[in-house]
Image (tube, rainbow, N blue to C red):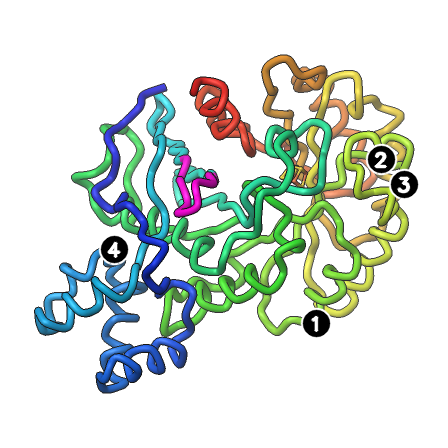
Amino acid sequence: MTEIPLHPAALPAAPSRIALLDMTLPEMEAFVRALGLPAYRARQIYDWIYKRFAADFAEMSDLPLALRTQLQAAAIIDPLRVATQVVSSAGDTLKVLFSLPDGQSIEAVLMLYDNRRTLCISSQAGCAMGCTFCATAQGGLARNLTSGEIIAQVLYFARYLANPAALPPTEVARPATVSNIVLMGMGEPLHNYSNVWAALRRLTDANAFGLGARHITLSTVGLVPQIDKMAAEDLQIGLAVSLHAPNDTLRTGLVPINRGYPVNELLDAVRRYIEQTHRRVTFEYALMRGINDTPALAEELAGKLRGLLCHVNLIPLNPIPDSPYQPSTSYDAENFASILREAGISTTIRLRRGIEINAGCGQLRRASKIST
Ligand code: SF4
C-alpha cells in the first residue's frame, strides 16, 4: 500500500458558497441570471465542469477575469476535500477518503481493468441499514449526500484519469476516463432516492457527464417500494440486489432490513422489475466462511433464483479486523458457484480488489477513525 500526495483538485470546501454541482443546467442559468449575467454563461460553466473537469474557476480561461472572481466569491465547484488517498501496490486500485464541508467523510474506489475503469461511489455518509458484516454500518447514518456530492466523486476520478502527472507509477495502461460506475460504496442508494436519481440524471445527460445509463449499476440491500419505483424510471440503470442469504432466518441476521422486506417479497419485486424493464438483475452474495457458503445454502439459493433473468456475483467478503465474519475459502467459493451453475444460473466469483488498501465499503473511513 502506498500513500500518495493529494491531488491539486482537493480544494477546501466553503459551505457558505452555493454548490454548482447540485444544479441542473436550467438551475445554473437561473443562477447566472441572478448574478446579472446572460444565460449562455451557464452553458460555458457547465461545459467546463462536466466536459473539461474544471475544479477551479481560474481554469475557465474563456470567461472574463472579473466573472471568474465573481463566481469564486459566490459559488463552489468541488465540495470534497481529500483526506486520505491510497493506491494498491499493483497500481490498479485507488481508494480515496473524502471530507465533506460539515466534517463527514465518504469513500470512493477506482478499479482499473484492461478495458474498463470502474468507479465505486458512495450515496450516503454512513448507512442506516445495519448489515452486521459491514464496516459502514457500525457508525450508523450521518446524512444523505447531495446530488452534487455524489457527482463530485465521479468528477474527481475523471480529473485524476485525465491528468497523468498526478498519477502514481503503475504498469497498468491508463485509460482516459471513468467508463463504469457502481453505487456500491457507503450508504443505501435507494434510501437517498431523490438525490441519487438527480445525480444519475446529470451523470447520464449528454450535456453534462454523458455516461451511458447501461454503464451504471445501482446496488440495493432490497428496499421493495423503491425497487418498484426504479422499475418505472426512464433511465436504463442496472440493478444489483445484495442478497447474501436464500432464507429469512439467515438473511435477517446479516441484513436486518430483511425483517421489513423478507426474501420472497424482495424476489417478487425483482420479478416485477424484470417484467417491466426486461433487464437482467445481478444478485450480490458476499461469501462468509461457515455462515452462508454451505452446499445446502447454494442448493436453496438455486431453488429461489431458478427461472429468473439474473446473474449471481459471489464476492468473498472483505474481512473487517476483529469481525466474526471471514471470507470463504476458494474451495468453498468454487463449490458454491458450481452448484449454482449446474442449476443453470449464470454465476461469477468476483475478483476481490484492493484488500490491502481497506477497499471494502467503509473500511478506510473506519481505519482513519481508529488511527486518529
Ligand atoms: S452493506 Fe451496504 S446497505 Fe448494508 S450497512 Fe453496509 S453500506 Fe449499508
Mark 1 or mark 4: name the one nearer the start of the chain: 4
Q: What is the magenta range?
A: 97-106
Mark 1 vs mark 2, CA separation in Å: 28 Å
Residue type at mark 4?
Ala
Badge number at residue 303: 3
Q: Which of pointers 1 and 3 lies earlier in the amino acid sequence?
A: 1
Tell me the quadrant of ligand 1.
Answer: top right
Which is closer to the viewer, label 3 or label 4?
4
Residue sitting at x 23%, y 28%: 169
- Mark 2 vs mark 4, CA separation in Å: 43 Å
Classify 167 as above or below 367: below
Residue 55, numbered circle: 4
State the SS at label 3.
helix
In this rendering, the label closer to the viewer, 1 or 4:
4
Circle 1 packing at 10 Å, graded few (<14), some (14-19), many (20+), is few
Up the image or down, 126 lies above or below 318; here it is below
- For disc 2, the marked residue is 252
Name the kind of residue labelled 3 in the image.
Gly
Q: Which mark is residue 21?
A: none
Where does label 1 land, which residue? 232
Question: As displayed, is residue 90 above or below residue 260?
Answer: above
In this rendering, the label closer to the viewer, 3 or 2: 2
Amino acid marked by disc 2: Thr
Residue 199 visible at all: yes
**Marks 3 and 4: CB-CB under 8 Å?**
no
Q: Residues within 10 Å of mark 4 (few under 14, many from 20)?
A: many
Residue at image x 36%, y 30%? 84
Residue visible at 56% across and 64% down in the picture: 197
Q: Amino acid at mark 1?
A: Ala
